[in-house]
Image (cartoon, grey):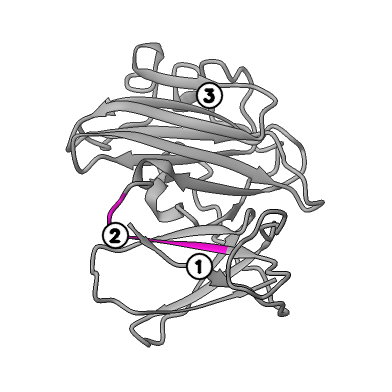
Amino acid sequence: MKKLLLLTFLALGNCLYAQNLAGTCEEAVSIYDYIGQPFQSAIGDVYANPSSAQNFGCILSPSGVSWFYIPVTENTDLDFQIQQFNSQGGWNDIDYICWGPFTTLENICGPENLNDSTVVSCSYSNSDIERINITDATDGTYYVVMLASITEASGTVNITNLSEATNTGAINLNAFLDANANGIQDPGEQDFRYGNFIYTTNNDDSLHTITSFNGNYTIYNEIENDRYTIGYEI
C-alpha cells in the first residue's frame, strides 16, 4: 500500500460540499459518487414517501432521508461507514436501512422489492456513526440504502468505503499539527478535526477538494505512475 505523510500548514479556505440529490427512492444515486464527498443532509421534516417500500424496518418514521444504490462489480464483502457532523463541531445521529440484493434497478422502488424479505440490515440508534456490512455480495447485483437524519437541524454526512482499506492502489493522507516540525506525527500531536485536502493529478487543471472531519483521507488509484500535488487548508 502506498503511504504519504502530509506535513500540514495553516491557511484560510472555504469548505466545499457535494449536494444531496437523492431525496426520493426514484432519485437514488450511486453511493460511490459520494465516497469522501461530504454532502448536506436533508432537513428532518422531509419524510420518506410511504409508497417507496413496504415499510422502513427499524426506522418507524424516517425523516431527513437520502437514497443511494450500491452497484456490485465483483464478488466481495462490502463495508461502509456513515457519519454526520453538525455546524457546532459535534456529531448528529444518523440511521439507515439497506435492502437487496437485486439483479436490476429498473422499477426497484415500491413494496414489491423493498420489503421485509429483502432487508439486509437496519439501524435506529443514537449513534453518530453507522456501519453497513454486506457479506458475500455478488458481481452484477445491486443494493438500495436509505439514510435518515432524524434531527430537525441539517448536518453534513460523510461516507467512507472501509472495504477498500487494503486496496493496493491507495495513498493515505494524514493532516496533523506538527508541533516540532520533524515531519513525523509524534505522540500527543493531534489530527486536524476539520479541513480540506486539495490535490491535482499529473499537473492537470482538475482541482479536487475533499473535506475531512478527522484529518485523514485515502486516494484510490490503480495507476501507479500517476503523480499528485497535494495541499491542506483549514
**Is residue 102 shown above or below 212?**
above
> Counting residues from the N terminus, which is met first, the one under dot 2 or under dot 1?
1
Residue at the image position 77 percent from the left and 38 percent from the top: 152
Question: Is residue 126 found left or right of 208 in the rendered image?
Answer: right
Residue bounds of the magenta highlight:
167-174
> Counting residues from the N terminus, which is met first, the one under dot 2 or under dot 3?
3
**Residue type, label 3:** Pro
Label drawn at residue 50: 3
> Counting residues from the N terminus, which is met first, the one under dot 1 or under dot 3?
1
**Residue type, label 2:** Gly
Residue at the image position 65 percent from the left and 38 percent from the top: 46
Q: Give how far across and how far down residue 63 sits, in percent.
A: 64, 32
Question: Is residue 6 found left or right of 89 in the rendered image?
Answer: left
Q: Give how far across and how far down residue 163 sits, in percent.
A: 36, 41
The nearer-to-camera label among 1 and 3 is 1
Q: The C terminus lies in which quarter of the figure?
A: bottom right
For label 3, the SS is: helix
**Is residue 19 shown above or below 106?**
below
The nearer-to-camera label among 2 and 1 is 1
Residue at the image position 30 percent from the left and 51 percent from the top: 167
Q: CA distance from mark 2 to mark 1?
A: 16 Å
Q: CA distance from mark 1 to mark 3?
A: 48 Å
Magenta-colored segment: predominant secondary structure: strand
Q: Dot 2, how many residues are within 10 Å of its Cα: few (below 14), some (14-19), or many (20+)?
A: some
Q: CA distance from mark 2 to mark 3?
A: 42 Å
Residue that mark 1 sits on: 5
**Residue type, label 1:** Leu
Label drawn at residue 169: 2
For label 2, the SS is: loop
Location of residue 221 by image quarter: bottom left
